[in-house]
Image (cartoon, grey):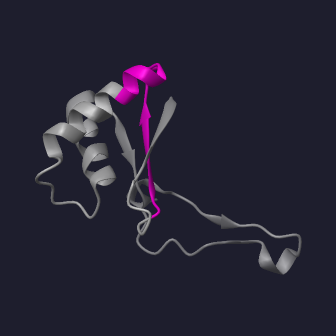
């Protein structure tokens, strides 16, 4: 699995979106896919950010997996102190 990241240009959001794909894309290839999706979506998207919209479009059209909290199985907090090292409550995460 190979991982790719899209950073949102809106500094107020300050977010990055993570994508995964079984195929290795050269950075320029990935950039071209992102630019193509951006052009398609720029004037109308339902997601909270353009980067999320692009990630979802690449998932639909190019076989990427948009890595979201919905896919997260486990989260662990680690610290030098034992009492602050624990499994974070996952709420409704799938088992």
Does 48 lie within the magenta span? no
Whether residue 55 can be seen here: yes
Q: Splitting the image into 4 quarters, where does residue 10 fall?
A: bottom left
Residue at x 34%, y 34% (from the top left corner) = 64
Q: Is residue 42 left or right of residue 62?
A: left
Q: Which residues are magenta?
A: 14-31
Residue at x 78%, y 72% (from the top left corner) = 85
Q: Is residue 90 left or right of residue 87?
A: left
Whether residue 63 can be seen here: no
Q: Residue furthest left?
A: 44
**x and y percentages locating residue 29 in the rendered image:** 38, 20
* 48 w.r.t. 61: above or below: below
Q: How many marks?
A: 0
Does 16 lie within the magenta span? yes
* 52 w.r.t. 22: above or below: below
**x and y percentages locating residue 34 in the rendered image:** 31, 34
* 38 w.r.t. 14: above or below: above
**x and y percentages locating residue 35 in the rendered image:** 28, 33
Question: As rendered, which of 89 and 38 lies closer to the eye?
Answer: 38
Q: Residue furthest bottom?
A: 83
Question: As rendered, which of 34 and 86 lies closer to the eye?
Answer: 34
Residue at x 88%, y 70% (from the top left corner) = 80
Q: Is residue 76 left or right of residue 25?
A: right
**x and y percentages locating residue 58 in the rendered image:** 27, 36
Q: Splitting the image into 4 quarters, where does residue 92 fall?
A: bottom left
* 58 w.r.t. 44: above or below: above
Question: As rendered, which of 85 and 60 lies closer to the eye?
Answer: 60
Residue at x 86%, y 75% (from the top left corner) = 82
Question: As rendered, which of 17 and 41 lies closer to the eye?
Answer: 41
């Amino acid at each position: 699995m190979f991982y790719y990241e899209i950073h949102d240009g809106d500094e107020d959001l300050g977010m990055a979106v993570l994508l995964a794909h079984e195929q290795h894309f050269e950075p320029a290839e990935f950039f071209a896919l992102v630019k193509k999706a951006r052009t398609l979506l720029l004037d109308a998207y339902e997601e909270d950010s353009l980067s999320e919209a692009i990630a979802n479009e690449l998932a639909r059209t190019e076989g990427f997996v948009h890595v979201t909290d919905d896919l997260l199985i486990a989260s662990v907090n680690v610290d030098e102190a034992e009492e602050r090292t624990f499994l974070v409550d996952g709420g409704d995460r799938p088992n």
